[in-house]
Amino acid sequence: MAERNDYDAIVIGGGHNGLVNGSYLAKSGLKTLILERRHLVGGAAITEELYPGFSFTTFSYALSLLRPEIIHELELTKHGFMPLLMPSTFAPMENGDYLYMGQDKAENHHEISRHSKHDADAYDAYGHMMEQVVHAIRPLMDSIPPDITSKDPVERARMAAIGSYLADLPPGVLHNLVRIMTGSAADILEDYFESDIMQGLLASSGIIGTKVGPRSQGSGLVLLYHSFGEHDGAYGAWAFHKGGNGGFTQVLARAAESFGAEIRLESPVDHVVTKNGKATGVVLEDGTELESKIVVSAIDPRRTFMELVDPMELPTDLVENIRRFRFQGTSAKVNFALDSNPKYPAMGDRTDQYRGFINMGPSLDYLERAFDDAKYGAYSKRPYIDGCIQSNVDPDMAPPGKAVMSCFIQYAPYHLKESDWDTERDNFGNTVQATLESFFPGFGDLVLHREVVTPLDIERTVGLTEGNIFAGEFLAPQMFFFRPAPGWNQYRTPIEGYYQCGSGTHPGGCVMGAPGRFASQQIISDLEAAK
Amino acid sequence: MIHETPFHPRTSAENKTGLWSHWSGYLATDRYQMSDKFEYFAIRNSAGVIDTSPLYKYRITGVDAERFLSGVLARDIRKCRPGQAHYTLWCDNDGYVVEDGVILRMSEDEFLLTAAEPNMAYLQDLVGPKSVEIEDVSDQIGALALQGPYALEILKKLAPEVEDIDYFHLTPAKIGNAAVTISRTGYTGDLGYEVWVDRADALDVWDALFEVARPYGVIPCGQTSLLITRIEAGLVLIDVDFYSSRYAWNDDQRTTPHELGMGWMFRDLESDDRAFIGRTAIERELRDGTSRWKTVGVMVDWQAWDRLYNSRGLIPPKDHTPENGGMMLYDQDLNRIGYTPSFVYSPMLQRHIGIARVRPEFGATGTRVGLEVTIDHKYDVVDANVTRLPFYNPKRKTA
């Protein structure tokens, strides 16, 4: 029995892409319902007070790739959008030294020179090269890719246009793009840098969220992807949203509602209803049936194609592609409530170094060894940690004088060979804490509360298959034309009226919002065409 | 010799950049650490402390002080009761702005007037036979602004009476053993206070304030961050948005209160029987509609901005460093219709904004104008919209 019959569009999943998509659909005049399984919106971009007075960014913890168009078109500043600058990057070293990068280019030059005069100069050259590549490829990322399988002359012409565009790039840029996209992060970084600390710091962006080591082919692509973002025109710069990424998704929810979208919490969807190859609505787990001619899945490709609908209704080649679409989450979070900022002995009583990322991955070898464990089905004995003490940037995150620290951990493979994550949770937490202790003596004494988030927890809580934070690996065969599958990269599905808009679609994850936006464009233009 | 503010021993210890500017003959920090944008966000998201001591400050006392000031100041000081403050202007006989400032009414017969420029002779020459004393207390009194959403929560731990003061009100208080005046005023357009303290007690106040404030992420903030916030707040700055009529060479350099967007000061002029300096000219300007300019905001079309820079092969700049000067404004036919004396990229609004002066017929909100930009030494015009000031006006400012 259908409860209501007057929705034009139903979006399944209130993560950031679902909210972006629902906002645009509502803004275009469609009566839009966003269904969220949990008691709060945000998906993996949530902030929770897991210990009194301390706000944890349980999963996703920083912002960079969010498309500026979304900020403006959805009028997010009216609803509290506030990307706070993270003015520093601090990279502790195993010998007690450190690399501390700030906002002043010349000061950074001096700081890098302490480690290598060569690298201090190379850093500028590397930065310029990366900016050029990012600037060149942005138009491709910021548009819906052509359908590579299509014989339609329009799609063929768009393919040809990409070829022309690439051929017109400034000399060297295309070659650099290919070097980065096909090579390893280590290959590129070793071309520019000689010091372990610079190589380690920069290579970290080449492994985040992905089951590759810095010396794996393909880590260059991950490095490039993480450089796509910007903070107020500074490419590759990250910001911390006020109130964490949960603060950001609350802004999105307010924007969605301001455009007239309805958000319904604690409304898990059981399946999408189809009739004669067309979507007609959804059925919630409690049996409620909701009708709508447009149904959009903001959840990952496996759930979109294999769980919400019957794979029998889909072409077998799509089912095959989705079956082998790689998730293989390898990241975890360990978040801490701390009695105060930790001390780094070489910095004395200073804490200004903790206003941005704290990168514990001081060399390529360190990162590659951490990956070695994962290759054989274990979590890293000495993991890579991307720390962030957000209370230093936003006082709302912790009581005055206290600190809340988000730690992104790699590697933590979803499939453990000799144990399971429920058994290993505390051991893993101890491993991470011991690693932090080795960099920040006395760290353990500061811990008031510890929250371990394993890949299994990510899957259970957020619904991301195998805990992959990008809703599918950033591997070349799963990107651009092929995300999530050849022929189905334009947000449509073989079921008419059923669309996809999650991070498993182009361009991908990282709280970018682009999939949600592009999907809304596709839906709106399909509706126009059908008129 | 350059002077040092009463807080100099602390500001110089905190200034890690070695960057100072000279403000009214005092050393003022441009930015304390390498990121002025971090200081800006402290003001908008926690609270920032700004040493505003270099302002000129005049203590005006005497039984005729109110009568004196009601003739000098354009805004009716009689409506500023003891315990209140006014933002005000003073004008010349032709109705042009001499200067602007904040005046605190400490008691029935005692006022503290702040000014950006020296005004001692100007004021004294107007006293005549009235019983008024004017004392230049610029060097004696330190001023420390605490601005931002956490300002109240922090300050009330030191001086609980601040909880009871409304926007543009003030209270005497004690911070530690120091007698201070705290006014709910500032130049950031945010919730904020200014603490006025004798030079001898200044360091004690600084230390007491920071002891409470540091755990909230409060940091000292330099001039650059202050100047970003003042543009967002739509607050004008002398020698940038207007010039003192006393030192202007011609009327093109002069500005009337209406032209400066201060017409609201004269809303009750009909029931106001004062004979203040400039009144006749101001009334005539109103009656005859002779205002040459309107002060408005302009907000740049973000798509046009990005498209323009991308078309030149450049990353569109989003620079939060305030630009002072005259970027020209054009109408749709490329006639010059005004300029933007103050311009900045606002991180809060994610837009390029400017305080602009346009011909009155182009002053309606939503009017499409063209802003002149120079890219690689070539002129171009980018679309912008006329908007109301202030650009940024959080409820907490006056709540």
Image (cartoon, grey):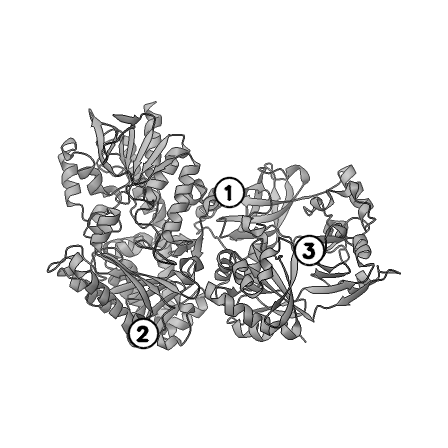
Give the residue at x 46% y 44%. Answer: A79
- Give the secondary structure at mark 1: loop
Where is residue A422, by image quadrant?
bottom left
- Give the secondary structure at mark 2: loop
- Give the secondary structure at mark 3: strand
Residue A338 place in picture, x, y as percent: 35, 66
Residue A41 place in picture, x, y as percent: 34, 44
Q: Nearer the viewer, mark 2 or mark 1?
A: 2
Give the residue at x 46% y 66%. Answer: B215
Q: Amino acid at mark 1?
A: Asp
Residue B357 place in picture, x, y as percent: 65, 46
Where is residue A435, by image quadrant?
bottom left
Q: Is residue A273 visible?
A: yes
Residue denoted by label 3: B85
Chain letter of the residue beneath label 1 in the structure image: B
Chain letter of the residue beneath label 3 in the structure image: B
Residue B156 place in picture, x, y as percent: 55, 61
Label number found at residue A442: 2
The front one of A299 and B244 is A299
Q: Amino acid at mark 2?
A: Gly
Q: Amino acid at mark 3?
A: Ala
Q: Are marks 3 and 1 on the same chain?
A: yes
Q: Nearer the viewer, mark 3 or mark 1?
A: 3
Label number found at residue B301: 1
